[in-house]
């Protein structure tokens, strides 16, 4: 916050021209959004909004902890509306709008006279509202519905849903807080904080910001709200099914947290809200807390794909360097939320470290969660598979489906930021916008075949000559980058990952930038015990993997890559409408003299094998087979 | 079964003189057996036998499947009696005998007038007996009580418990079978089959053998008993918590099984009973089924330690070559039971393949389950740990504790077999016995410092000169072995892993055998994806591991062993009363130029490190720390 901060140019103001993102976006518009609505219908989720009705039997039974994912169906609806609204910003669609309006009508009918709105509680156990914030997702549901309402209002100008949610927020604000008679509660699953900040940014209503700040700062205070709440319910707080309040990051106040713990999605939503609040409130303490958590995550707890949370049991973090590959949980939602967090950190400090992680999580950990057909998904994203990890058409907890669709539908919003005297490019990939810089309207048109190629051209067309900064992110993975203005080479002197070009820009000006995009090996810190003796492959923003479809002849885990083997990038038009693969002479280990014995004093023999690596985000779109990211390395 | 089979010399007829087993045995006698009784007392297990009493509250609550380990407490009692009785065969102990007699009195009181005996059902829900063989362990409990009764009778000649169990067996035999009015059931957890065969061998009562054969052959027949039984209970068979009858190996009839599946301990007990029946009934079909399963287990599903069952969820098998190290379940009981199975296979065919696996599982997978102090245990035996895997003093399911104590207390029973005209040595380690060979009483005294050294001497002292075979197992791990009779070198021509020396033996004769015991690397089949690029270390029958206590300076997983490094065996008197460690010049990977970054294009640097490897069976007896069996290998 040393200099005036850049603000993200909203996705709706950015056009996408690159084939890579264009194709993803159109798949989401054409296939994902409609098919998700059909799934919500089919699963009874939409039906569950139609109150009053006699409580139907539980479609999704309670688990052994007495919890059912059905209790957060409202959030799925909210997230779908948000994703669908983002799609509408690209292309209005009367059918989708009618579907949203029908849902909004149901929500209107479901809302209590006092503003409370939760279809589970209103339909099933109205007397129990606000009795279990720890487990039952009321505030989380509210958050997603609010985000949906904001997105729908922004896309269409229709404010019915927004009004419903404003009433609900008023009710929440009256219920929770530090004033006498209020409950000192906060969400078990963070999310509403992000929604409230968005609402503040939309309406300017400062009370929304204050409520978000309250939720963040109250978290983990003593006496512990979830303990008091459990006692009030007659439950033993010590028998909390998750075992520890680390699960939802309420073990200590958030400003004291320096290690990222517990459920990864909750953690990322919380950190995103903390970064937002640090910006809005110029709160240096919150910013420092964010930075400490950022260091912990990126230095010790993040997969090379930008995946987060190795463990299934808590859907979250374990301990530093514990990053198993085959059993990696690495929930799609967690990487989506890491994109959110990194984007917010970037607007606290324009530092390429944040943009690098944002890009990494976007292209790899998050995007992998959506199949190329737009209708199949990964919930968890392991870095190795023996062939059993397959995409599903839906999930008992469909959170990831709409998280990835809302991200893709709004991806352009992560590309460019601006302030009065400058524009900053974070992501490349054919993003174009018009911004007012130094008081002049400027058309900015970035053209590239990114992520396949690093050759980037940015046309800068001010309506009249104007002096302003053009800040170009020089990706951390680029060992070298060259640039030119109007064909004339310039020297790049990047500071914190951004090179600044300041000049009097005139219509027809163009900057070219070419960050070298060599294919290269990555090595993990030796404390990552799973990756000792292994290398991952990266080219530009993409992490690669070897998949059996490209490497027939047995499990890909038997491939070993000599350290001296060159990695050749190859443009393959036959794969997924065009993709760069990496090819390398490698070895395939086969039983040696041991004659197939399970163990032998004879080392396996090594046969020559041509290895082909595919971007990780494209795996599992063909016949199921083995896959791995961290490839055994051979010296020499 | 081509030639007359060898029979095991019972452990009670074998003296142990080697320091290795003598020390283990004495620890079990002095510490393990008494402390296990105290634990049975403390946990309420002994109290639960005291019927009639009002059913006390569940000490161990039912899990989400409605099951409680408390339902098989009878088996823990049976197994403790068996272990304690084996101890008595070494050393009578009035206190232990009084404790057993008190239990027997309780069992007598608990037995129903019709012979039925199950403390859970008789105390708690007598009307439900025999309604859930699939889950509720009645026949399993019976089996362990029978084995306890047999062992106690053999040790003391007291037959009260044996009589109780004979009555119960009569009741079981009347209840189950193919006659009209009988139930066509069989155990959900195999075990009683082994007990019935032992009972047959003790009493000669052929009905016991027939009942065992019935249980084995009925298993998996159609209509499926567990399905019919569930329907009778009003349960939906499709909602079986384990998901598949593979869990208890009843998915198809046993003779059709060629892949070892499901719960590993059940599988091993079943296979042991199948081998016993193949022998007793000269049943070639069962023998072939055993052989197919043996090939499957040893060629594709066994850890290098003789551990079985990688997965916690089913405590069992998954798929070929799926042998994760850190998350290995490898239950102690499963390796104990693999010793049982291998021992029985060996008596179907005197083939060193079986003895090799028996020895491997005994010294590594099984023995590791018991701490050197004799009062701490491992239930699961991973091949890698980051330091969190610690021994426990007891377990909610204490099955492994008494399985390992009964094995150690009877270990001498696996060493030697005999038939009329010969004796066969399978295990070495200071085992001595007297056998009647060719009609002459022969003292056989094997002396060695095995497993630390391969120098073995066998004194053969017949009362008068006699001609018979002395069969010496030449371990599969011995690349070379030399032998001499009375100091004169002889040529060993082993067939199927056994060298036969036939001569006229006279008092004072001695055979020396020296299987070379070099320290060496083992490699896994390349399909074992976890072990690609890694080597395990073996010396003689012992698998080694690197443990942090011997390799300070960070996680042992950062150690890399050059393929060319010599492995030096070193006798260490300072470790555990004497043990051979392996030392090798190795490398420790440390962050290179990457300055501690989680991922870097720079490979880690490799510092020289002296690596010390310890026998796996000795790990986790000092300060907790990281450990691994499969060490990253560097070429060159």
Image (cartoon, coloured by chain):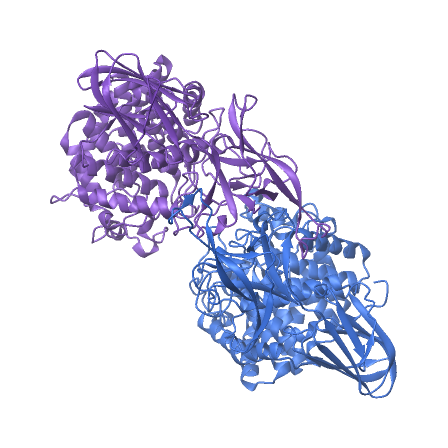
Chain colours: A blue, B purple
Q: Left of B461 or right of it: where is A389?
A: right
Q: Nearer the viewer, residue A373 or A100?
A: A373
Quadrant occupied by the N terminus of chain A:
bottom right
Q: Left of A491 or right of it: where is B634?
A: left
Question: Please, which residue is most extreme toward the left here?
Answer: B180
Vertical order, A559 against B10 (above or below): below
* Residue A518 at x, y percent in the picture: 66, 67
Whether residue A240 is visible, yes or no, is yes
Vertical order, B96 against A145 (above or below): above
* Residue B151 at x, y percent in the picture: 28, 23
Q: Give residue B437's quadrant in the image.
A: top left
Vertical order, B190 against B155 (above or below): below
Please state the total of marks drawn on the protein image.
Answer: 0
Q: Give residue A383's quadrant in the image.
A: bottom right
Q: Nearer the viewer, residue A117 or A579?
A: A579
Q: Nearer the viewer, residue A413 or B463?
A: B463
Q: Residue at x 46, y 45 (%)?
A: B523
């Amino acid at each position: 916050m040393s200099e005036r901060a850049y603000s993200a140019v909203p996705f709706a103001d950015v056009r996408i021209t690159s084939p890579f993102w264009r194709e993803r976006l159109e798949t989401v518009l054409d296939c994902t959004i409609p098919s998700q609505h059909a799934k919500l219908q089919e699963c009874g989720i939409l039906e569950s909004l139609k109150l009053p009705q006699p409580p139907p039997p539980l479609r999704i039974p309670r688990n052994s902890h007495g919890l059912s994912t059905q209790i957060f169906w409202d959030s799925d609806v909210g997230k779908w509306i948000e994703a669908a609204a983002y799609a509408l910003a690209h292309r209005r669609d009367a059918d989708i709008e009618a579907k949203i309006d029908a849902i909004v009508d149901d929500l209107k009918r479901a809302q209590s006279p006092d503003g409370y709105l939760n279809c589970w509680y209103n339909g099933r156990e109205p007397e129990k509202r606000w009795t279990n914030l720890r487990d039952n997702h009321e505030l989380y549901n509210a958050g997603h519905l609010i985000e949906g309402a904001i997105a729908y209002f922004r896309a269409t100008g229709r404010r019915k849903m927004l009004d419903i949610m404003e009433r609900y927020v008023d009710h929440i604000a009256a219920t929770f807080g530090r004033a006498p008679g209020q409950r000192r509660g906060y969400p078990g699953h963070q999310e509403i904080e992000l929604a409230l900040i968005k609402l503040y940014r939309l309406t300017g209503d400062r009370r929304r910001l204050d409520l978000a700040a309250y939720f963040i700062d109250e978290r983990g205070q003593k006496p512990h709200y979830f303990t008091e709440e459990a006692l009030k319910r007659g439950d033993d707080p010590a028998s909390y099914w998750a075992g520890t309040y680390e699960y939802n990051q309420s073990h200590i106040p958030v400003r004291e947290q320096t290690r990222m713990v517990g459920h990864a999605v909750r953690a990322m939503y919380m950190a995103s809200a903390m970064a937002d609040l640090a910006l809005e409130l110029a709160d240096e303490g919150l910013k420092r807390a964010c930075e400490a958590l950022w260091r912990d995550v990126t230095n010790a707890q993040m997969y090379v794909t930008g995946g987060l949370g190795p463990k299934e049991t808590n859907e979250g973090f374990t301990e530093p360097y514990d990053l198993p590959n085959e059993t990696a949980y690495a929930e799609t939602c967690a990487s989506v939320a890491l994109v959110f967090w990194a984007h917010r950190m970037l607007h606290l400090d324009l530092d390429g470290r944040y943009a690098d992680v944002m890009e990494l999580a976007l292209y790899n950990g998050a995007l992998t969660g959506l199949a190329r057909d737009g209708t199949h998904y990964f919930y968890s994203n392991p870095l190795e598979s023996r062939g059993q990890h397959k995409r599903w058409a839906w999930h008992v907890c469909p959170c990831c489906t709409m998280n990835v669709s809302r991200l893709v539908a709004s991806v352009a919003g992560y590309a460019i930021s601006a302030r009065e005297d400058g524009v900053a490019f974070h992501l490349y990939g054919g993003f174009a916008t018009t911004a007012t810089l130094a008081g002049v309207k400027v058309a900015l048109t970035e053209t590239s075949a990114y992520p396949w190629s690093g050759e980037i051209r940015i046309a800068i067309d001010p309506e009249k000559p104007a002096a302003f900064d053009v800040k170009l992110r020089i990706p951390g993975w680029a060992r070298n980058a060259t640039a030119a203005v109007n064909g004339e080479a310039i020297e790049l002197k990047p500071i914190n990952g951004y090179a600044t070009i300041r000049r009097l820009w005139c219509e027809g000006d163009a900057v070219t930038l070419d960050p070298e995009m060599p294919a290269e090996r990555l090595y993990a810190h030796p404390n990552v015990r799973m990756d000792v003796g292994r290398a991952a492959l990266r080219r530009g923003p993409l992490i690669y993997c070897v998949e059996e479809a490209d490497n027939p002849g047995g499990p890909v885990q038997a491939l070993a890559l000599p350290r001296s083997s060159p990695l050749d990038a190859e443009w393959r038009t036959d794969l997924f409408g065009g993709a760069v693969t990496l090819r390398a002479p490698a070895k395939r280990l086969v039983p040696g003299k041991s004659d197939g014995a399970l163990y032998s004093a004879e080392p396996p023999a090594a046969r020559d094998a041509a290895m082909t690596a595919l971007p990780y985000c494209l795996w599992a779109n063909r016949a199921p087979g083995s896959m791995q990211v961290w490839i055994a390395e051979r010296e020499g």
